[in-house]
Image (spheres, grey):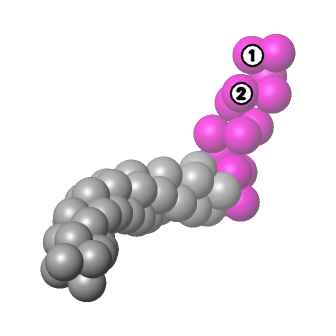
Amino acid sequence: MAEFGRKLWRNEEGQDIAEYAVMLAVILVIVVGTVRLIGGNANNVFSAVANQVGQ
């Protein structure tokens, strides 16, 4: 197992995969945060419009 870790550490392809995984994680955190922020605000806007239309 230790030998596999050393090979992976020295292998440039392994480092590329790790970099892509980190970038994907960062992008997912940004997207999820944005969707949660906009989702809450969108719900408030639609509720306000529905209340105005219903009156």
Q: Which residues are magenta?
A: 1-14
Which quarter of the image is occupied by the N terminus? top right
Q: In the picture shown, does residue 46 fall above or below 44?
A: below
- Quote the CA–CA distance across marks 1 and 2: 5 Å
Relative horizontal placement of residue 51, taking residue 33 as reference (left or right)? left
Identity of the residue drawn at 27% across and 58% down: 40
Q: Position of residue 28 (x, y in %)?
A: 47, 58
Residue sticking out furthest to the bottom: 53
Identity of the residue drawn at 71% across and 60% down: 13
Relative horizontal placement of residue 39, taking residue 3 as reference (left or right)? left
The answer to whether any part of residue 31 appears in the image is yes
Q: Quadrant of residue 45?
A: bottom left
Q: Position of residue 27 (x, y in %)?
A: 43, 63
Q: Nearer the viewer, residue 14 or 41?
A: 41
Q: Which residue is mark 1?
A: 2
Question: Circle 2 sits in a helix, a strand or a loop, which is it?
Answer: helix
Q: Can residue 8 be found in the magenta stretch?
A: yes
Which quarter of the image is occupied by the C terminus? bottom left
Relative horizontal placement of residue 40, taking residue 10 as reference (left or right)? left
Q: Which residue is mark 2?
A: 5
Mark 2 is surrounded, within 10 Å at the Cα level, by few (under 14), some (14 to 19) or many (20 or more) other residues, namely few
Count how many numbered circles sit on residues in the image. Answer: 2
Identity of the residue drawn at 48% across and 52% down: 25
Q: Quadrant of residue 30?
A: bottom left
Marks 1/2 in contact by CB < 8 Å: the verdict is: yes
Q: Can residue 25 be found in the magenta stretch?
A: no
Q: Nearer the viewer, residue 55 or 15?
A: 55
Q: Position of residue 5 (x, y in %)?
A: 71, 27
Q: Amino acid at mark 2?
A: Gly
Residue sticking out furthest to the front: 55
Q: Amino acid at mark 1?
A: Ala
Residue sticking out furthest to the top: 1
